[in-house]
Amino acid sequence: MTKAEQLEALRQRRITVGFNRMLAPEPDFGTELVTTEKLLLAVNESDPLADCQEIPFSELAHHPLVVFPTGARPNFIDKVMALCNECKFTPNISQEVGDAVTGVALVASGFGVCLVPESATTLQLPGVVYRSLRDVPPQGRCRRPDLHLPAGRPVSATGRLS
């Protein structure tokens, strides 16, 4: 489900919880951090950054950046822009694409580097390596505030009561 579909399903009580990386404050929902994920940098193997095991986040100021996803905001692009702002630079965005797969594919083609959540590093494309970033905080669950789960009733990975 998309972010909007999850919010609508929560409002209609078709689901109990929704999962999303970025959510604007919603007056009828509470949010809770469920897990965190490291950010890594997808780099073309011919880029000098590929020789580094750990890259300072501020180094991104000097490289074209592929960002994702296009679409409803806030999203991961807003998180990337906020991190760049915290490091006092405006990124040189070479491409804005719909998803991580396209972003990493453009890295493989030499269009720049791309910040990705650790879970996206399972995507292994020829010519792309992933590098750790220095000085970046790790990167939630949305539920109705009136929801009180019965004791001993865990919520499954799909967000439904088990």
Image (cartoon, rainbow, N blue to C red):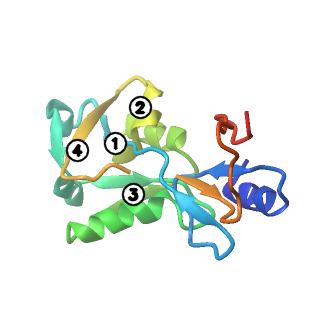
Labelled pair 2, 3 in contact (Cβ < 8 Å)? no
Of all residues, the one furthest to the bottom in this rendering is: 27
Give left or right: position of 69 versus 55. Answer: right
Query: Depth-wise, is mark 1 or mark 3 nearer the camera?
Result: 1
Crowding near pointer 4: few (<14 within 10 Å), some, many (20+)?
many
Residue under the image location 53 percent in, 38 percent down: 101
Quarter of the image where the C terminus is located:
top right
Give left or right: position of 146 versus 96. Answer: right
Question: In the rendered view, would you say 109 is above or below 92?
Answer: above
Residue 18 on image: x %, y %: 66, 51
| Residue type, mark 4 in image | Leu
Q: Which of marks 2 and 3 is nearer the N terminus?
A: 3
Crowding near pointer 1: few (<14 within 10 Å), some, many (20+)?
some
Q: Which of marks 2 and 4 is nearer the N terminus?
A: 2
Label 2 vs label 3: CA separation? 21 Å
Question: In the rendered view, would you say 145 is above or below 46?
Answer: below
Kindly identify which numbered label has been placed on residue 38: 1
Label 1 vs label 3: CA separation? 23 Å
Q: Which of marks 1 and 2 is nearer the N terminus?
A: 1
Query: Depth-wise, is mark 2 or mark 3 nearer the camera?
Result: 2
| Residue type, mark 3 in image | Ser
For label 4, the residue is 133
Residue 41 visible in the shown view? yes
Give left or right: position of 31 versus 136. Answer: right
Kindly identify which numbered label has been placed on residue 94: 3
Q: What element carries label 2?
A: helix
Question: In the rendered view, would you say 137 is above or below 110?
Answer: below
